[in-house]
Image: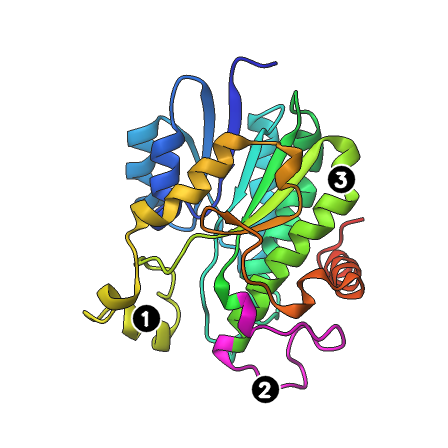
Amino acid sequence: MSAQRTVVITGASDGIGAVTARELAGGDVDLVVVGRSATKLEPVIADTGATGFTADFAKFDDVRALAGKIRDRVGHIDVLLNNAGGTFDPSRRTADDHEPNFQINHLAPFLLTHLLRDRLAAAEGGSLVLNTSSIGNLAGHVDLTDLDYRRRRALELRAYGTSKLMNILFTRGIAERWSDDGIRSAAVHPGPVASSFGRDSFFVGLLYRTPLRHLATITPEKGAEPLIALARRGADPEINGVYFSRHHANGRENRQAHDQNVIDGLWSASADLVGVG
């Protein structure tokens, strides 16, 4: 096997992504970190020696450009940690005219992962795609006839929860479709982390900016623990397609999480929307 593992972490400029990057950094890891803000990403790069790239997941052109930069930088990827995202006002639209929770939390990592598939398949001993999900998936509902809320009213908790459910469904789709390439996938709820993930949401941001956050949240260091453990575990077939609630396999899931029609339908619709095969 290669002496050095290549690890790519999105959403690495702060919160659990930054903690994970700092913990995984070392001579045995070729680390690539991705963030939306170059200024916020700079301290992580300085602390870890990682290669850093910026991208706004609300723009598919940014995601495609990011994939190109990563492909130019590395020949294989052992761990792809899809951690970028948050909760967003669903009444807004992205640059690509999608509901933001749907695009930033699901479609963008779906596109990035597809564009990096050959690099994942090139890893000796297999690779792991780790998707940061949430217990919020329980509040979600995937309507394959209206993924982008063109006719339904989009409530923020439902839109966010649906995108986190999609992270699990994407995980299952990878496990079913790419295992022959040595690519494994898992999803993880890190816990209610006190970070800036709700910065684009007035409602969630209000909670996270008040002392109330201490009553219901854990530190980014604590939240990063299961991501770090799973990234180190790597391409273990036993975790393929598994959703973890922190360190515990088979966390509480939405009833749609194992619905094969929804898994397949979401994969097909997403591939059409982002233009991948």
Identify the residue position indicated by label 2 in the image.
Answer: 153
Q: Quadrant of the N terminus?
A: top right
Image position, residue 261 (x, y; %): 80, 65
Quick check: 40 above or below 259? above
Badge number at residue 178: 3
The kind of residue tagged 3 is: Trp
Residue 53 can be seen, yes or no: no
Label 3 to label 2: alpha-carbon separation: 35 Å
Quick check: 125 above or below 189? above
Element type at marker 2? Answer: loop
Image position, residue 37 (x, y; %): 37, 49
Identify the residue position indicated by label 1 in the image.
Answer: 205
Magenta stretch holds residue 140? yes
Magenta stretch holds residue 12? no
Mark closer to the chain start, 1 or 3: 3
Give the magenta range: 137-157
Task: Check whether the beta carbons of the residues at disc 3 and disc 2 lie within 8 A of each other.
Answer: no
Name which residue lies at 60% across and 45% down: 186
